[in-house]
Amino acid sequence: MTTIKDKEFGGERPLFGERNLRLENVTIHTGESALKCCANIEADHCRFEGKYPFWHVDGFKITDSLFTPGARAALWYSRNCEMIDTQIDAPKMFREMDGIVLRNVNIPDAEETLWHCDNIDIKNVKVEKADYLFMHSHNIRIEDWEQHGNYSFQYCTNVEIRNAVIHSKDAFWGTENVTVYDSELHGEYLGWHSKRLHLVRCKISGTQPLCYCKDLILEDCEFAPDCDLAFEDSEVNARVLSPITSIKNPMKGKIEARKVGEIIIDEHSKAIDPVEIHEI
């Protein structure tokens, strides 16, 4: 592997097509596509200032580095990326990628990040301004995660999340095969139109949670008082260890709660048989 150390590059495609290259304390200044169409790249203690530095790259590891706001859309159309101890201040990262590992990464401007990606493994990552995060992505594993940003995880499949704090209106819309363990989920309209959403020991807040769901399972979860009008048109099997303020028109299944407030069954109910609802 060739090593480049203590150098600066700028302009258009300065390292285009490189293979088996290690960068140490290298700065990529303003320009475009610094490492386009490369393979087997390592970058340690590097600074990326120019646009699109890693496009169409197969196999790269980035450690202790910085992506400034100018390095927008930095990692697209690439495979097998590992990123550790890195600060990402650039927007719109990670698009149409396969194989992403993130460890100890901070992304304060995560809007429209991680779209159309597959095979994602994330641990100890914090994201802010994360509207439309994870659109149409698949096979995701997340642990020790903190997020602020709305409309996240829309249309994702095969997701496992552990020990997360998620502040997101409209989280998990249209998802399939999602399991969340030991997490806090804050935001309106949680999980609408999902299939096989499974929440285990989660704390949930926000109005109208978990409506229009199929095969919804809740195990030992807790609802905040603002979780009203829950489970409309949902197929649900839920055990809730707190009071539920109100339940509206559940379609099928069983709901257990510490205490049940208002139960609304009106002319819009689609239930064929009564849903079992009782206090524990």
Image (cartoon, grey):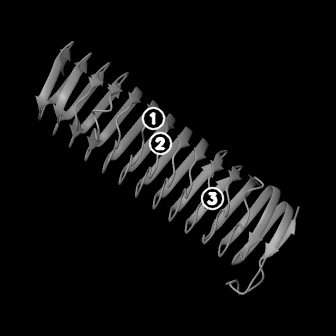
Write down the quadrant of residue 51 in the picture. Answer: top left
**Label 3 crowding class (10 Å Cα cut-off): few <14, some 14-19, many 20+?**
some
- In the picture of the structure, the residue carrying the numbered disc 3 is 198
Q: Compared to 268, does 42 lie above or below?
A: above
Towards the viewer: 110 or 162: 110
**Label 2 crowding class (10 Å Cα cut-off): few <14, some 14-19, many 20+?**
some
Give the secondary structure at mark 3.
strand
What is the total number of numbered labels drawn onto the structure image?
3
Residue 149 in the image, given as x and y percentages of width and height:
51, 47
> What kind of residue is marked 3?
His
- Image depth: mark 3 or mark 2 in front: 2
Give the secondary structure at mark 2.
loop
- In the picture of the structure, the residue carrying the numbered disc 1 is 108
Residue 36 in the image, given as x and y percentages of width and height:
16, 38
Write down the quadrant of residue 163 in the picture. Answer: top right
> What kind of residue is marked 1?
Pro
Cα separation, mark 3 vs mark 2, equals: 26 Å
- In the picture of the structure, the residue carrying the numbered disc 2 is 129
Marks 3,2: beta carbons within 8 A: no
- Residue found 50% across the figure and 55% down from its top: 151
- Residue found 29% across the figure and 38% down from its top: 72
